[in-house]
Amino acid sequence: MKHSIRRLALATAAALACQAAAAAPFQAIRHDAFAQSCQALWGKNAVRSHWVKDDGQGGLAYAPLNGNGDRIMDFSSAGYMGGGVALPAAPVKATVKPSGNAASDLANIQAAIAKVAALPAVNGVRGAVLLAPGAFLLESPIQLANDGVVLRGSGSGAGGTVLKAQGAGHAMLSLGGASASLTPVGSAAAIADGYLPSGASVIHVADASGFKPGDAVMIRRRASAEWIHFMDMDQLVRDGKPQTWINAGNNNEYWLRAVAAVDGKSLTLNAPLSDSFDSGYLGPNSASVQKYQANGIASQIGAEHLALEGQPRGSGTDYAVANLDNLADGWLSDIQAHNFTGGVVVGKQGRRLTLEKVALSHDHNNVDCSGAKEFEFSIAGSQVLVDRSASTGSKKSFYYATQAQAGGPNVLLNFTGRAEACGNIEPHQRWATGLLVDNADISGAIALGNRGADGSGHGWSMGWGVAWNSKADQLAIAAPPGATNWAIGSSGALTPNVPDAQGVPVPPKLGAVDSANVRVGPDSLYLMQLCQRLGPQAVKNIGY
């Protein structure tokens, strides 16, 4: 009975919010010169969304989803250094020429990386290893594990640098520390808010005396049996066997933030949280904030201006493009990768990363749409910006997928996807939150919803996600219990059902759809939010 009452209350609150749209107060940000100078980013689209509007002073205003204050979050802290910072132009400190021998090529590259890693850092950057034009043969990944070292090719096109995969299957590039840990510092403080809305950046604790501006903090949200039941995720069955979505007590949903300000018992975070915290379902002491020390997390590492060559899928040897884990403030830029079974993988400890102009292409092959799809971009980390990237020619793939309990903001901006048969932008499993798909143009589906018993019980794979001014064959946009996903200014056949999802226990409801098939202003939500927060120079810094 309690669950039925709760559902009715949430549905009623959402309906009232929609009916009173014109009168509802909007949450707004910056009303200063930054806002005024961002006007051009509204573009030529006269239509405005109900959910994100011009506040009349050049700023953005957000309509609440319900009486709890949940709203579309500010995604602008996704990307290198928290967004809006240009990638560094590392000076060349070592040059390597191809040898024509796989063992020698890798050894020569790693020796040059070690040489640069021993140099002093300037603003966190030690220097670049430049790979001369030509083909380098790789039987193992190039390891970039030392702070401040950049691997730079001589171009990703004709006459540039090519890394050719050889031998047994492996990734071509590995960026980040070999191992990492997050060590708690002091005692965890319980979050005192009875309800903390999605998109919030201010939290309250019983005693804030142990925190100060600049502290690195981890905010945890523990799953409870009551919340899992509310989400209908204790009913997943596959082949007659119960499937586990998230175990009760699991606290792997977390966000790494810094304290920006302390005021009494309130802590202001440097970036908002992508999920809501409802103590009525999560239980007492289910959410906490804890100072921590990061160990083994590398930073200021990048790979750029490279072509990579693998083998077609189904050839018998599977190669991957790159793994980025245990890495903060890193990047891939101008990477052309051809014929790789696996794409770019960002692990759980990958954060504040920019993957720009990464194009994955595939020759035609005989792999059909049955069975598991491959990942072109697989994101388990947070504050990851995938920008002006593409996937073409694959028979079956997830163009882009978040992984289990990946906490946003994560952003896919200006992405192009063309699969020969089946390709989706599709969060993969177990309640990732806070994904912005901004100006994507793909064949296949943008699917923000419930995967049911697929896999081992992937269930609700995305909450608080937004498809903004995007185009797909299908928009599979569903509203999880107590939350929603948005499709705004986007085009495609609307459905609440994720393609081919099996064993969904309760038919999902369509998410929040606004301005279907008609683009809205601003042209890009991410770029406008970035401009609002940091000014127009931040937008220029990332190449717009």
Image (cartoon, rainbow, N blue to C red):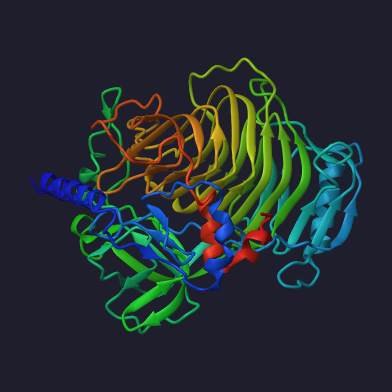
Quadrant for the N terminus, please: top left
Q: Is residue 349 above or below residue 420?
A: below
User: Would you say residue 391 is visible in this rendering?
Assistant: yes
Q: Is residue 300 above or below residue 386?
A: below
Frontmost residue, 133 versus 359: 359
Frontmost residue, 169 versus 246: 246
The residue depicted at 44 percent of the width and 82 percent of the height is: 212
Where does the image place residue 537, in percent across and percent down from the top left?
Answer: 65, 65
**Does 14 sit left or right of 133 as displayed?**
left
User: Would you say residue 179 is visible in this rendering?
Assistant: no
Q: Which picture quadrant has residue 73?
A: bottom left
The residue depicted at 72 percent of the width and 64 percent of the height is: 148
**Does 196 sit left or right of 296 as displayed?**
left
Frontmost residue, 448 versus 208: 448
Where does the image place residue 33, in percent across and percent down from the top left?
Answer: 55, 72
The residue depicted at 52 percent of the width and 67 percent of the height is: 35
Quadrant for the C terminus, please: bottom right
Where does the image place residue 337, in percent across and percent down from the top left?
Answer: 72, 36
